[in-house]
C-alpha cells in the first residue's frame, strides 16, 4: 500500500522545475509494499527488504591466489644467489582438506586450495624453477605474497548488501558465495497502465483515417517491467469522462500506482485531470521542461496516480524523470544512481532559458577516441528509437557550442 501526502499538491498553478517536482513526490510518498522471500535464482531485479550480513567470511578459509608453491617465508633466508632451494613435500588441490607444511620445505599448491598450516607465502609457478624434487624460489618474494586470507573480501558478520538494493547479477554472485539460498525482498509494486484518446488504437486493430497506434503503452509497460514492477495492462480509454471515471476508480482497487498517458493537457478532450479531481484528489503540474510540460499527479483511493502527456517523447522523458524515481520509492529501493554523464557535445543548440530541455542524442567516438554526443537523426519516434540517450540542458543554459560539455543520460541507465 502506498501513501501520497497532500504537500505534493501544493502550488498547483506554478510551473515547477523538474528537480522540485521529483523532490516533492519523493518526499510525499512512502513505500509500504510488503516483503517476502524468493530463491536466489529468482532474485535478480528484486529489492532487498533487509540488510544481508555475511553468515560466513569471504573467502571462507585462507587459500592460494595462484598455482605455485607454498612455504614459510622465514625458510628463504640464506639464498646467496638470490634464490632459496626448498625440498618439495606434499600437494594440495582446490577442494582438498587443509594440510600442514613441514618446516624448511615447499608444498605444491593450486589456486583456491587451502593454505597449509604454517605456510605464509605462495610463489607463482612461473617464478619458480624445479630441480629434481626441490624448487628454487626467488628470495625477493614478499612475505604473504599470493596468500588470500579468510574474510579479506567480506568479514564474518559484516553487512554485505544493504536493504533497499535493487539486486543485479553481480549481487547474486556475492549472495551465492555467502551461501545465501533465499533472499528477503520487497513485493513488486503493482502498477495499472492505461492509454487515453479517441484516436488511439492497438497495433493489429483496424485503424480509421484519423487513427494512430498506441506507442506509449508498450513502451511504458516494458519500462515498468524492467524496473521490477508488477504491471496490469488496462488498455486504451476513450475520451469519455464517465467511462474514465469508472475505469480509473476500478483500477485503484489493487494498484499501488495508476499510470496513464494522454488527456492531461488543456484541450477539450483532456478529461483526465477533471476526473481525477472528482474521483480522488489532484495535483497538476506544469513542468519547466521540454518536451513534457503537463503532468498530473494525484490519488485515487489508496492508489497514487500519475498522468503523463500523450506525446510519446514527452511520455518517455516524464517517465524517466518523474515516474522512475517515484517507482523506486514505491519499491522501497534506495536512491537511484546518478545517471547523467558529462560528455563532449558535437552539436550546437540554442534554447530558451528557464526550462530544462532534453535532446535525443547518439553517443560516438571522435578521432581521439573520446566519447561525444551528436543529435540523433530523424523525427520524434524515429529519433527516440535511434538515440542512445537524452542530453540534459539545464534551465539556465541558453546555448551550447560544439566542444562544450553536455550531460547525457544513456537510456541504459534510465531503466
Ligand atoms: P494528448 O496529451 O492526449 O493531448 O495527446 C498529445 C499528442 O500525443 C496527440 O497528438 C495524441 O494523438 C498523441 N498521443 C496520445 N496518446 C498516444 C499514444 N498512446 N501513442 C501515441 N501517441 C499518442
Ligand atoms: Mg488525448
Image (spheres, rainbow, N blue to C red):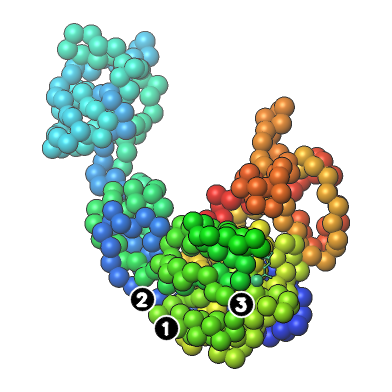
Work out whether residue 56 or residue 197 is closer to the camera in this orientation and state it: 197
Q: Earlier in the sequence, mark 2 or mark 1?
A: 2
* SS for dot 3: loop
Query: Which residue is disc 2 drawn over?
Result: 34
| Relative side of 345 to 223, left or right | right
Q: Is mark 3 within 8 Å of ligand 2?
A: yes
Marks 1/3: CA distance?
A: 22 Å
Expressed as whole percent of the image width and height from the top left, the position of residue 245 reads 54, 85
Query: Can residue 126 be seen from the camera position used here?
Result: yes
Question: Ligand 1 near label 1 (Cβ, under 8 Å)?
Answer: no
- In this picture, residue 305 sits left or right of residue 78: right
Quarter of the rendering occupied by the N terminus: bottom left
Q: Position of residue 88 (x, y in %)?
A: 18, 19
SS for callout 1: loop
**Residue at the disc numbered 1:** 253
Of all residues, the one furthest to the top in this rendering is 132
Label 3: few (<14), some or many (≥20) within 10 Å?
Answer: some
Badges 3 and 2: C-beta atoms under 8 Å apart? Answer: no
**Residue 231's quadrant in the figure?**
bottom left
Q: Earlier in the sequence, mark 3 or mark 2?
A: 2
Question: Label 3, on which residue?
Answer: 239
Question: Which of the two residues, 8 or 118, is positioned nearer the viewer here?
Answer: 8
Q: Is mark 2 within 8 Å of ligand 1?
A: no
Label placed on residue 303: none
Q: Is residue 267 above or below residue 353?
A: below
**Mark 3 vs mark 2, CA separation in Å:** 35 Å
Which residue lies at the image location 26% right of the left edge and 59% below the top edge? 39
Q: Are marks 1 and 3 in contact (CB under 8 Å)?
A: no
Amino acid at each position: 500500500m502506498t501513501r501520497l501526502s497532500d504537500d505534493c499538491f501544493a502550488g498547483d498553478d506554478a510551473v515547477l522545475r523538474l528537480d522540485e517536482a521529483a523532490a516533492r513526490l519523493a518526499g510525499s510518498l512512502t513505500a509500504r509494499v510488503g516483503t517476502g522471500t524468493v530463491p536466489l535464482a529468482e532474485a535478480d531485479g528484486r529489492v532487498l527488504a533487509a540488510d544481508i550480513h555475511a553468515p560466513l567470511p569471504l573467502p571462507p578459509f585462507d587459500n592460494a591466489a595462484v598455482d605455485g608453491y607454498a612455504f614459510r617465508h622465514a625458510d628463504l633466508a640464506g639464498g646467496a644467489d638470490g634464490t632459496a632451494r626448498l625440498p618439495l613435500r606434499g600437494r594440495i588441490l582446490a577442494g582438498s582438506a587443509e594440510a600442514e607444511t613441514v618446516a624448511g620445505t615447499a608444498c605444491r599448491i593450486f589456486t583456491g586450495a587451502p593454505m597449509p598450516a604454517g605456510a605464509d607465502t605462495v610463489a607463482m609457478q612461473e617464478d619458480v624453477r624445479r630441480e629434481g624434487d626441490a624448487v628454487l624460489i626467488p628470495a625477493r618474494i614478499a612475505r604473504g605474497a599470493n596468500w588470500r586470507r579468510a574474510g579479506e573480501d567480506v568479514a564474518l558478520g559484516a553487512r554485505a548488501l544493504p536493504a533497499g538494493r535493487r539486486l543485479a547479477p553481480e549481487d547474486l554472485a556475492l549472495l551465492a558465495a555467502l551461501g545465501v539460498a533465499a533472499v528477503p525482498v520487497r513485493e513488486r509494486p503493482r502498477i495499472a497502465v492505461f492509454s487515453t484518446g479517441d484516436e488511439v488504437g492497438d497495433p493489429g486493430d483496424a485503424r480509421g483515417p484519423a487513427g494512430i497506434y498506441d506507442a506509449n503503452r508498450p513502451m511504458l509497460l516494458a519500462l515498468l517491467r524492467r524496473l521490477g514492477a508488477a504491471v496490469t495492462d488496462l488498455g486504451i480509454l476513450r475520451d469519455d469522462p464517465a467511462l474514465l471515471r469508472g475505469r480509473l476508480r476500478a483500477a485503484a482497487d489493487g494498484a499501488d500506482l495508476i499510470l496513464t498517458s494522454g488527456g492531461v493537457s488543456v484541450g477539450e478532450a483532456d478529461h483526465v485531470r477533471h476526473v481525477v479531481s472528482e474521483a480522488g484528489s489532484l495535483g497538476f503540474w506544469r513542468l519547466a521542461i521540454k518536451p513534457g510540460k503537463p503532468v498530473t499527479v494525484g490519488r485515487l483511493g489508496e492508489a497514487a496516480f500519475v498522468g503523463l502527456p500523450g506525446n510519446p517523447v514527452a511520455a518517455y522523458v516524464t517517465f524517466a524523470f518523474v515516474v522512475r524515481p517515484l517507482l523506486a520509492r514505491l519499491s522501497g529501493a534506495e536512491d537511484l544512481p546518478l545517471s547523467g554523464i558529462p560528455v563532449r557535445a558535437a552539436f550546437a543548440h540554442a534554447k530558451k532559458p528557464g526550462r530544462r530541455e532534453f535532446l535525443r542524442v547518439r553517443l560516438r567516438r571522435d578521432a581521439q577516441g573520446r566519447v561525444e554526443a551528436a543529435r540523433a537523426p530523424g523525427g520524434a519516434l524515429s529519433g527516440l528509437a535511434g538515440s542512445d540517450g537524452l542530453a540534459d540542458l539545464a534551465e539556465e543554459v541558453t546555448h551550447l557550442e560544439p566542444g562544450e560539455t553536455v550531460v547525457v543520460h544513456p537510456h541504459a541507465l534510465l531503466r
